[in-house]
Structure formats: C-alpha cells, structure tokens
Image: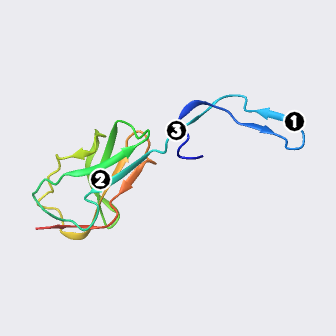
Amino acid sequence: IPSTLATGTDYRVRITSTSSTAITDTSNTYFTITSASSITVTSPNGGESLIRGTTPKITWTSSGSTGSYVKIELLKAGVVKQTISTSTPNDGTYSSWTIPSTLTTGTDYRIRITSTTNAAIMDTSNNYFTIRS
C-alpha cells in the first residue's frame, strides 16, 4: 500500500480478468486504510550520561493511531528495572521522573515507551545510556 495513499474507511478491491472484462468481482464490504502507527524514543536515545537524583526529560514522537496514553519503562540489560509511568499522556514529553539515588549505576540502560491502547506499538532507545553517581 503506497504511503501516499489517503487514509479512509471506504476502500474496496476489484479484480477483473485480463482476457475477459466481463469476469470481475469487487469486495463485498468496505475496508479501512490507516497510516502506520509508531512511537519513537528521542531522548534518552543512547550515549547520554544521566546522574542519579536528577530529573531528566524523556521525549518521544508518535504518529498514527497510537492512543492518548503511553507507558514508560526503564530497562537495564533488556530487563525492566523500573516502570517510570504506567500511563502518561502521549504528548511527547515526560518530566516527572527523578532517577532514584539507590538505582544501580551502569552503562546498559534504555527507555521503552509503549502505547497503552496497543502494546505492539512501542519503541526502545536505539542504544544504551549511562546512569552514574
């Protein structure tokens, strides 16, 4: 489906024989074409060095039907270390997380942001970032 095709709820498919145009059929009902839905973590996205006790801004972009809310998680070595927010508005910015002073330091942290409407729509920081004292 071309990305330039307009979204809509009134699409149907028609198939016609190339040897006899009298042989044809059209979809019985309409179907919907929507734009691809996505979430993209923009910060921290890898390479940053964050300090325990500070309040970094977490940012992302979203497009399509991602829903009004997202979940934000902190991963360490690919495993959920902390759920930062179970549900925050999908507005592209979260500034309410203070890195716990007791959090283990390390160079293998990532952020994962997931649509609360459709868990298949998610993104994780492209590369690891560091959390230090």
Residue that label 2 marks: 73
**Amino acid under disc 3:** Thr
Q: Residue at x 17, y 62 (%)?
A: 103
Residue 119 spot, x, y in % from top left: 43, 46
In the image: residue 20, left or right of residue 38: right
Of label 2 and label 3, which has the lower sequence position?
Answer: 3
Which residue appears farthest toward the bottom when viewing the image? 107
**Amino acid under disc 1:** Ile
Label 3 residue SS = loop
Q: Label 1 to label 3, Cα distance in Å?
A: 30 Å
- Front-most of residues 81 and 48: 48
Residue 43 spot, x, y in % from top left: 25, 56
Residue that label 3 marks: 34
Of label 1 and label 2, which has the lower sequence position?
Answer: 1
- Front-most of residues 111 and 5: 5
Label 2 residue SS = strand
Residue 7 spot, x, y in % from top left: 53, 35
Of label 1 and label 3, which has the lower sequence position?
Answer: 1
Neighbours of disc 3 within 10 Å: few (<14), some (14-19), many (20+) = few
Residue 74 spot, x, y in % from top left: 27, 57
Neighbours of disc 1 within 10 Å: few (<14), some (14-19), many (20+) = few
**Amino acid under disc 2:** Glu
Q: Nearer the viewer, mark 2 or mark 3?
A: 3
Q: Label 1 to label 2, Cα distance in Å?
A: 55 Å
- How are the colours assigned in the image? rainbow
Q: Nearer the viewer, mark 1 or mark 2?
A: 1
- Which of the numbered marks, if any, corresponds to residue 23? 1
Q: Is residue 66 above or below residue 72?
A: above
Q: Residue at x 53, y 46 (%)?
A: 3
